[in-house]
Image (tube, rainbow, N blue to C red):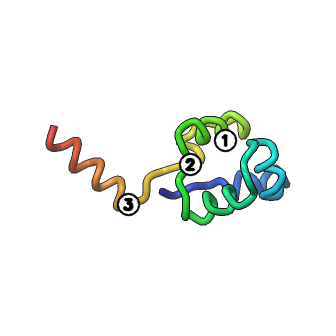
Amino acid sequence: MNNRLKVARAERNWSQGDLADRLDVSRQTINAIETGKYDPSLPLAFKIAYLLDCHIEDIFQPDAIELEQIRRQLDKS
């Protein structure tokens, strides 16, 4: 999954630690999300979007492979 978390965080001049504190998660969790090593749970994604005053889709988007898989699954329906 692609995300704009690092950009959105930088626009607010927040460090990873600042964002982690606001979300009550570890700095390592923020780093893992930003580097694509971890996809947040839906509740955490909502919390991030709420904190950043945007929609989840403004921060998180499926990558090309995931999007193709979604299309194939929906076309079978």
Secondary structure, mark 2, is loop
Q: Is residue 53 above or below residue 62?
A: above
Residue at the spot of label 1: 48
Q: Are marks 2 and 1 in contact (CB under 8 Å)?
A: yes
Rounded to the nearest angstrom, the CA distance separating label 3 from label 2 is 18 Å
Q: Nearer the viewer, mark 2 or mark 1?
A: 2
Rounded to the nearest angstrom, the CA distance separating label 2 from label 1 is 9 Å
User: Nearest the camera: 7 or 16?
Assistant: 16
Left-right relation of 28 to 77: right
Q: Residues within 10 Å of mark 2 (few under 14, many from 20)?
A: some
**Mark 2: which amino acid?**
Pro
Secondary structure, mark 3, is helix
Residue at the spot of label 2: 40
Q: Nearer the viewer, mark 3 or mark 1?
A: 1
* Residue at 67 percent of width and 41 percent of height: 48
Residue at the spot of label 3: 64
Q: Is residue 56 above or below residue 2?
A: above
* Residue at 72 percent of width and 40 percent of height: 52
Whichever of labels 3 and 2 marks the residue nearer the N terminus, that label is 2
Q: Is residue 12 above or below residue 77?
A: below
Left-right relation of 74 to 48: left
Q: Position of residue 14 (x, y in %)?
A: 83, 53
**Mark 3: which amino acid?**
Ala
